[in-house]
Image (cartoon, rainbow, N blue to C red):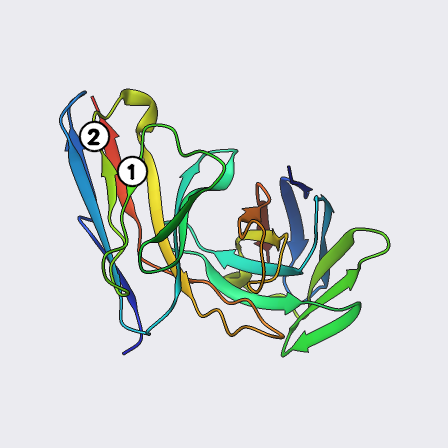
């Protein structure tokens, strides 16, 4: 089954404690990205990656890091989480061969609470 | 930068037709997409417009006018299960060549379908 998986699905942590949210896709997609979703603000892109070892900032990259060492994986790293990073996070992937379409496949989401 | 405007809430009656508008201001434009998100769920792709005109997929249609920087999602024969949030999204550049490959989402329109 084609899918994007994220782990963990729920996480409560404390300020300053480094954490990683994993994202993996099995569709051989080149493009992967991370979003955060906050009430009234919609989905905001944090980082995206065009392919292995190619990453770039989205609209709200501050406080986050990413890496793309393998095509299927795109972890999101919060080196020193703060309460303002409490949010719902989504990973998404898509192919680059998207002439005529631009379908993003989203993971199930990770609800993060930073105390 | 990019910005997208869509109504925050819409209410419609079961069986009726509803139109959700999206206007955008972007430095470049490659295509307009629509996503549906039920409460507690992940966004799922609905429709894409790369060129002007109407795209139809079952009960859902999407329209784009690039000269007006405007698009809409049309939902026909509304059903209770259509109650969800709907997001428009714009990519400002095709995947080939230099440029930003950010994907920007609107803040979402919460559709409530009532009996």
Check whether the beta carbons of the residues at disc 1 and disc 2 lie within 8 A of each other: yes
Left or right: where A110 falls relative to A46: left
Which chain hosts label 2?
A
In the drawing, does residue B15 fall left or right of residue A61? right
Percent of width and height locating residue B110:
57, 46
Residue behind mark 2: A79
- Provide the residue designation for mark 1: A65
Circle 2 SS class: loop
Q: Residue at x 41, y 50 (%)?
A: A48
Residue A56 percent across, percent down from the top left? 43, 45
Residue drawn where x is 64% and y is 74% of the image? B59
The foreground one among A99 and B15 is: A99
Residue found at x 70% / y 44%: B27
- Residue B60 is left or right of residue A76, and the answer is right
Sequence-first disc among 1 and 2: 1
Residue located farthest toward the right when viewing the structure as drawn? B67
Classify the position of the N terminus of chain A by image quarter. Answer: bottom left
| Residue B10 picture location, percent across and down | 66, 46
Label 1 Cα neighbours within 10 Å, binned few <14 / some 14-19 / many ≥20: some
Instruction: Give the alpha-carbon distance from disc 1 to disc 2, as whole Å.
Output: 8 Å
Counting from the top left corner in percent of width and height, residue A115 is at: 20, 21
Give the left or right position of residue B32, taking residue A10 as reference. right
Q: Residue at x 37, y 69 (%)?
A: A29
Q: Above or below — where is A60 with respect to A14?
A: below
**In-front residue for pair A81/B83:** A81
| Other residues around mark 2 within 10 Å, as few (<14) / some (14–19) / many (≥20) | some
Numbered mark located on residue B74 in the image: none
């Amino acid at each position: 089954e084609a899918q994007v998986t994220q782990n963990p699905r729920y996480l409560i942590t404390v300020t300053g404690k480094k954490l990683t949210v994993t994202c993996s896709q099995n569709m051989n997609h080149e493009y992967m990205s991370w979003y955060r979703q906050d009430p009234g603000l919609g989905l905001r892109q944090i980082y995206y990656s065009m392919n292995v070892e190619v990453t770039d900032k989205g609209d709200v990259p501050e406080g986050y890091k990413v890496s793309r060492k393998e095509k299927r994986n795109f972890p999101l790293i919060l080196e020193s989480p703060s309460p303002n990073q409490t949010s719902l996070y989504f990973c998404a992937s898509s192919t680059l061969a998207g002439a005529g379409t631009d379908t993003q496949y989203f993971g199930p989401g990770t609800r993060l609470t930073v105390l | 930068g990019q910005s997208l405007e869509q109504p925050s809430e819409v209410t419609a009656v079961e069986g009726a037709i509803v139109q959700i508008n999206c206007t955008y201001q972007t430095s470049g434009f490659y295509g307009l997409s629509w996503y549906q998100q039920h409460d507690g769920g992940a966004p799922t792709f609905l429709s894409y417009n790369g060129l002007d005109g109407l795209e139809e997929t079952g009960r859902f249609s999407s329209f784009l006018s690039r000269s007006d920087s405007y698009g809409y999602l049309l939902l026909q024969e509304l059903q209770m299960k259509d109650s969800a949030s709907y997001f428009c999204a714009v990519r400002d550049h095709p995947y080939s060549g230099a440029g930003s490959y950010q994907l920007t989402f609107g803040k979402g329109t919460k559709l409530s379908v009532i009996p």
